[in-house]
Amino acid sequence: MRIVFSLVVGAALLAGTASANAGAAAEMAPADSASVGDKSYGAGDTLRVGAGSSQTVRFADGTSLSVAGPAELDFVQIDSSGRRLMLRSGTIANAAVGGMAMEIQTPASASMVLQNASGMARVSGGNVTFRKLGGEYAQVWTGGALRPLSGTWSNAAAAPAAPPVVRTAPPAVRAARAPVVRAAAPAVRSAASGDTRADRIAQLEAEVARLRAELGNARAAGYTGRPAKYLELGGQTIAYRPGDDFLVEKTDGGGAKLTYDGDDFGIVTVGRDTNLFLWLGDSVEFDSSGRVVNFTGISHLYDSLSTFFMWDNPIENSSDVSISRPHIR
């Protein structure tokens, strides 16, 4: 175990500087040698094996290496303190190492350390592979650390794996709904008026808008909430139209005055018996009981349906339509 520790420290120091340390190692320990057939190899020598060939490197203690070509193997350190070899390319198919520890270095700064064990080493381009074939002690030196080797190690496997390509299903694309195109209905003209259906609808919508406006104005007057323009004075219901054409004034005593301010004529209906017609500037004034106290227009009187006496006298002059003579109609 002491020898192995020495080799591990050396692995960190000698990686890439094999030649400089070989001489120092030779001074520290007795020289050792390896042989390939009849040829001996010492520290600083290189073994080259051609393609398709194989060579066996043997050491005095029985350690052997089976090198398969094409291969290039440097002998970095060979002495009694340990053995270091640099496999620059090719394959050591079987490194059967005895009691003296052996470090097999590679250009990729990764080493395999064996003692009383056998292993395989391969360098192909930048890829390095180590495999323990059997025995006791087998470790890998890489990244400044020593780790046990129990099976196969590769720098390709040790490198950070590329993130997996996650293929997500594309989001469901809903077919765009075709816009609803509503074909305009053919214009149907009334045989009687010549108006189209669209014209009639527009007229009705305008009439609805006008009626809503009248209702709003009536409610804004503040006298009643009925859906028309009214005054209620002393229990008497007074209607006026067009409501927008009248000016409404409250008078002293709780009465009211209506003044026509339109461009045609206005009508004020008192109860069910009287219609008052007003021209521009005409007015009618009521007291708090709903009775007419002042009027500048023209009146049209109706007798109640319950009237016992019926008159058939024609209206001959303006006095006959005076509110002072309601029995004349």
Image (cartoon, rainbow, N blue to C red):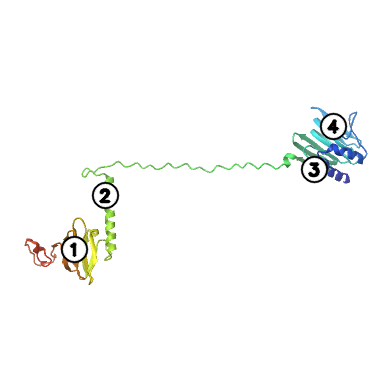
The answer to which of 219 and 68 lies nearer the viewer is 219
Picture quarter containing residue 144?
top right
SS for dot 2: helix
The type of residue carrying mark 1 is: Ser
Query: For the residues marked 2 and 1, what is the alpha-carbon distance in whole angstroms?
Result: 33 Å
Instruction: Choose the circle earlier in sequence order: 4 or 1.
Output: 4
Q: Are marks 3 and 1 in contact (CB under 8 Å)?
A: no
Query: For the residues marked 3 and 4, what is the alpha-carbon distance in whole angstroms?
Result: 23 Å
The answer to which of 68 and 111 lies nearer the viewer is 111
Whether residue 329 is visible, yes or no, is: no
Residue that badge 3 annotates:
141
The type of residue carrying mark 3 is: Trp
Instruction: Choose the circle earlier in sequence order: 2 or 3.
Output: 3
Residue that badge 1 annotates:
283
Instruction: Choose the circle earlier in sequence order: 2 or 1.
Output: 2
SS for dot 3: strand
Question: What crowding class fits label 1: few (fewer than 14 Cα within 10 Å), some (14-19), or many (20 or more)?
Answer: many
Q: x and y percent of residue 47 in the render?
A: 84, 31
Q: Which mark is residue 203?
A: 2
Question: What crowding class fits label 3: few (fewer than 14 Cα within 10 Å), some (14-19), or many (20 or more)?
Answer: many
Instruction: Choose the circle earlier in sequence order: 3 or 1.
Output: 3
Residue that badge 4 annotates:
46
The residue mark sitting in front, 2 or 1, is 1
The type of residue carrying mark 2 is: Gln
Query: For the residues marked 2 and 3, what is the alpha-carbon distance in whole angstroms?
Result: 98 Å
Q: Are marks 3 and 4 in contact (CB under 8 Å)?
A: no
Q: Are marks 4 and 1 in contact (CB under 8 Å)?
A: no
The type of residue carrying mark 4 is: Thr
The residue mark sitting in front, 3 or 4, is 4
